[in-house]
Image (cartoon, rainbow, N blue to C red):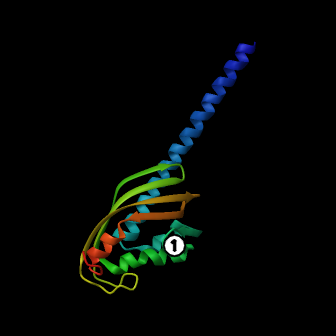
């Protein structure tokens, strides 16, 4: 009898673990699809209105200075759409573990508009970077981008190489 109960407990534990793993895999897949779609629309198509519903209300962008709130996050990324024409945002790789994502990306464009107060230089940029993001209930809650800002500013032409 003890062996039967032990076997049932073991089977139950294995089934519940697989079930949790399956839920995490589905959540990861859904978050990757949604997150990738948001950036294709916002940056490549220039339709930043998608960001109105992509972020949680109290979203945080870990930048300098830190950006708080979904309206401010949208305004932050609108600088890329206004500042660059011929934009191409490429997600080279993306990984997720539930609500945590890591995205390896490339951004290309021509600096033809004002970008965070920097007047257009007409220069082409081609930078790579990585973003760590956290999702909450299917929306973006936090983001932190990592890229070579010196190289980026040199490509724009505001810092000498």
Q: Is residue 112 left or right of residue 130?
A: left
The residue identified by callout 1 is: 52
Does residue 14 sit above or below 70 in this rendering?
above
Crowding near pointer 1: few (<14 within 10 Å), some, many (20+)? few
x%, y% of residue 130? 40, 59
Task: Identify the image quadrant of residue 114.
Answer: bottom left
Outermost front residue: 161
x%, y% of residue 113? 32, 84
Q: At 30% from the left edge and 70% from the top edge, which residue is drawn? A: 151
x%, y% of residue 149? 36, 70
Q: Is residue 116 visible?
A: yes
x%, y% of residue 146? 41, 63
Q: How many marks?
A: 1
Q: Is residue 110 visible?
A: no
Q: Is residue 28 left or right of residue 92?
A: right
Does residue 33 sit above or below 79 in this rendering?
above
Q: At 42% from the left edge and 77% from the top edge, which residue is drawn? A: 78
Report helix, strand or loop for mark 1. Answer: helix
Task: Identify the image quadrant of residue 56.
Answer: bottom right
Q: Is residue 18 left or right of residue 63?
A: right
**Which image quadrant: the N terminus?**
top right
**Which image quadrant: the C terminus?**
bottom left
Q: At 41% from the left edge and 59% from the top edge, which residue is drawn? A: 36
Q: At 52% from the left edge and 53% from the top edge, which residue is drawn? A: 100
Outermost right residue: 1
Task: Identify the image quadrant of residue 12.
Answer: top right
């Amino acid at each position: 009898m003890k062996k039967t109960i032990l076997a049932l407990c073991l089977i139950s534990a294995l089934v519940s673990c697989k079930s949790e793993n399956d839920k995490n895999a589905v959540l990861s897949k859904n978050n990757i699809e949604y997150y990738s779609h948001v950036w294709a629309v916002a940056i490549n198509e220039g339709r930043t209105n998608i960001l109105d519903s992509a972020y949680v209300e109290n979203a945080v962008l870990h930048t300098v200075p830190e950006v708080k709130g979904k309206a401010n996050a949208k305004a932050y990324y609108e600088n890329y759409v206004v500042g660059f024409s011929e934009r191409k945002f490429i997600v080279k790789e993306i990984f997720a573990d539930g609500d945590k994502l890591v995205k390896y990306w490339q951004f290309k464009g021509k600096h033809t508009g004002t970008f965070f107060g920097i007047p257009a230089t007409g220069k082409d940029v081609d930078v790579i970077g990585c973003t760590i993001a956290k999702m909450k209930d299917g929306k973006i809650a936090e983001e932190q981008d990592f890229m070579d800002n010196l190289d980026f500013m040199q490509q724009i032409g505001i810092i000498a190489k």
